[in-house]
Amino acid sequence: MPEGDSLHRAARRLQVLVGRRVEVETPHPRAAVKGLAQRLDGRKLESVEAVGKNLLLHFEGRLVLRSHLRMNGRWRVERRGTARRGKPWLVLRGDEYEGVLWNGAVLELVGEEATRRLGPDILGEPPDYGAMLSRLRAEPPAREVGDALLDQRLVAGIGNVWKAESLWEERVSPWRRLEDVGEGELRAVLEAAHELMRASLDGARRPRRAYRRAGRACPRCGGVARSAAQGAHARTAYWCPGCQVGGSPPPS
Ligand SMILES: [Zn+2]
């Protein structure tokens, strides 16, 4: 699943269209029914930003198009007129370049107020750690930290990979309750997520230490890593019980 860093990458690529008046097409039938092309065609694209796992495209007239890539969505930027097969969800055509969205999943016009319901972006420059911490502290204190980190209302942009990796970095078990995680520790986990995602955005390759390593030896302590479903959406948590202790993990 695309995480915040891949959305920021897409936002960077789409900057070539910012400030341009764009022709808008929605070739895919599931996108065509939304009537977006009629609303947006010929408007100027004023800005493109990644907020968490959402791409927000601001058009003149205070129209904001929200794109969330879900599992398979992908933005590409190509020279205008590049031949393609298949039906993309959306084509934004400028004088020289085209932004093309494949497998859109979530594509909708939203008011500017809707974009404010997301938590502060973990890839903000600089990230607003204070606001993230106060949102996390306003949650029920028994909520597990690994579950809370994926809640986009609290912190926008962290997905399952960087949740596992940032908790591992700071030796925090995903099963600890928010009330049992100190302020300094919680901030360190957020900082680790920011650093790791920032590096990934800049093209760094780093071997995974926790994500999808269940059953393998922990590179830090040699313990056997585990995985288990966590939270209301049963997303898989990965951790090392040897060096990320505490909380109430499911019995192995
Ligand atoms: Zn370990």
Image (cartoon, rainbow, N blue to C red):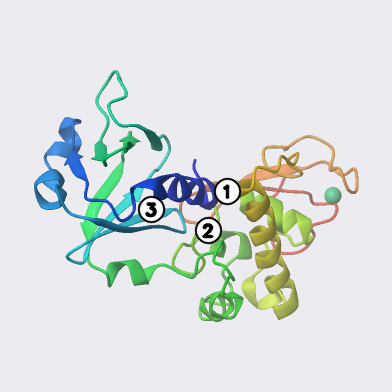
* Left or right: 129 in relation to 7: right
Q: Earlier in the sequence, mark 3 or mark 1?
A: 3
Circle number at residue 160: 1
* Left or right: 191 in relation to 46: right
For marks 3 and 2, give the one nearer the viewer: 3
Tag 2: residue type? Leu
Structural distance between the alpha carbons of marks 2 and 1? 7 Å
Local SS, label 3:
strand
Residue drawn at x 17%, y 54% as measured from the top left: 43
Tag 3: residue type? Leu
Mark 2 CB near ligand 1 (8 Å cut): no
Residue labelled with disc 3? 55
Structural distance between the alpha carbons of marks 3 and 2? 17 Å
Residue labelled with disc 2? 150
Local SS, label 1:
helix
Task: Relative to 122, say whether 87 is above or below.
Answer: above
Mark 2 and mark 1 residues within 8 Å of each other at the beta carbon: yes
Q: Is residue 237 visible?
A: no
